[in-house]
Amino acid sequence: MAIRKLELLAVILLSIARFATAEEITVAAAADMSAALPDLVAGYTTKTGETVKLSFGASGNLTNQIRNGAPFDIFFSADEQYPEQLISEGLASKDTLYRYAVGRLVLWVPNDSPLDLSTSGIKALLDPFVKKISIANPATAPYGRAAEATLRHYGIYDQVSSRLVLGENISQAAQFVESGNAQAGLVALSHALAPAMKNKGRYWLVPLDAYPTLNQAAVVLSKSSHKEAARKFLDFLRSPEGASLLSNYGFSLPAGKN
Amino acid sequence: MNWQAFWLTVRLAAIVSTLLIAIGIPIAYWLAYSRWRWKFLVEAAVSLPIVLPPTVLGFYVLVALGSRSPLGRWWALYTGHTLAFTFEGLVIGSLLYSLPFSVQPLVSSFGAVEPTLLGASASLGHSPLQTFRRIVLPLSKAGLITGFSLSFAHTLGEFGVVLMVGGNIPGVTRTLSIDIYDQVEAANYSSANRTALVLLIISFVVLSIVYGANRRPWGVGPWR
């Protein structure tokens, strides 16, 4: 009996040890990546056999968690400003910063909506049918700030501000309108193109000049204990295969450096 | 300190706990005196919110009462808007969320009333309703105070349901707990700290009222 227990203990200890040495990286990612990144990881796992854990949230929330010691290896932000703050605080390594796409904002409505986006564009929001408009919380989510900037750019912010509802991150903003609780939403193109929403509604692509550019950037964090594995994953992101997986979700590589 | 969020939260908690006493009294009366063999199933259902994750409740309020469901469409037809993102939506969510906190203290105080008093009242010609009003309710004062205070405090601290169905609208659905969350996430620790302290003090005061109301003036412990 005693031997049996010892054996069991040995097996448990060995399996714990195995988990501890496995080079599994943890990625903290902006919520606009919630559909694209699992695809990217699946491609990476098929190719290399390595696994990646994913954690999603508003970029501002994740930045704050990283400052407070969250055990992430890579940070995917929807806005370059957050990774740059982390670099200046010594929490991320500058040479790993990689701008992988420009995030696009869309105005999304469900299929059964009477709004005609193709002719009225953003002005569709002025229709009395629209009682609630979901956006991400501008305090923590870059897409929320982009949504506010867009409404101001078209001069309709004051007319619609009382109808705005704030999602905790851009995924919740998408869920609010996808579930029909809001009649329209300013959400990420990546969600509009994701299987969960693709056939449920239509969208109007907000022109890039309506809001400050959402430079999507990834960076390896200084406290990471798997820096090599993290760099390998970012290399896959840079590869043509990675880029093509991301482009399925409307994430295209920006013109210019990097 | 966000005073708008403070008063919104106090108003929500006051409305919910008042309604819960009104709803809770008949439910508790039935639970305390019914001899139906399947009563335990109702007891379990009433107590569900104690163990049910708030996210489950939030999910149901958002989807089952959303504009795609029959119930939600009926509500929208009647009121002109869906339940999500409104103060009424928070009230309904909170009623479900805090129900056991008003019902359970009421059931135990109704059940603690001496049965001979009920018999005496009936033999003097009082109807069950008169007996309840004149004997049971006055003797259940501690239960009423406890039920009101606990559901008030529980609603004050509600977070998950509000985060899921509220939409974070200032003055409508941005409650104190959401305000603290936002401040922490935006790294405004000093502001979060002040709000947190206010909630801590209120919670302590409310619980002191509960324990004060249930205090036994004459100790009868074996340690005497």
Image: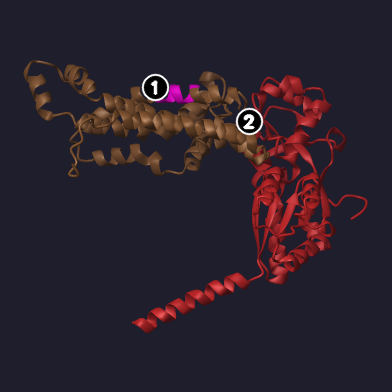
Chain colours: A red, B brown
For residue B224, which quarter of the picture? top left
Tag 1 subunit: B
Q: Examine the structure image and report whether residue B107 is included in the region drawn in magenta.
A: no
Q: Residues within 10 Å of mark 2 (few under 14, many from 20)?
A: many
Q: Nearer the viewer, residue A109 or B115?
A: B115
Percent position of residue A143, x then y: 74, 39
Separation of marks 2 and 1 at Cα, in angstroms: 30 Å
The structure residue drawn at horizontal position 51% and vertical position 19%, both measured from the top left corner, is: B78
The structure residue drawn at horizontal position 70% and vertical position 55%, both measured from the top left corner, is: A37
For residue A79, which quarter of the picture? top right
Question: Relative to A222, does residue A151 appear above or below in the rendering?
Answer: above
Question: Relative to B219, does residue A241 appear above or below in the rendering?
Answer: below
Q: Are marks 2 and 1 in contact (CB under 8 Å)?
A: no
Residue A14 placement, left or right of B134: right
Q: Amino acid at mark 2?
A: Ala
Q: Amino acid at mark 1?
A: Thr
Residue B68 placement, left or right of B203: right
The residue tagged 2 is A182
| Residue range corresponding to the magenta coloring | B11-17
Q: Residue furthest left?
A: B123
The residue tagged 1 is B18
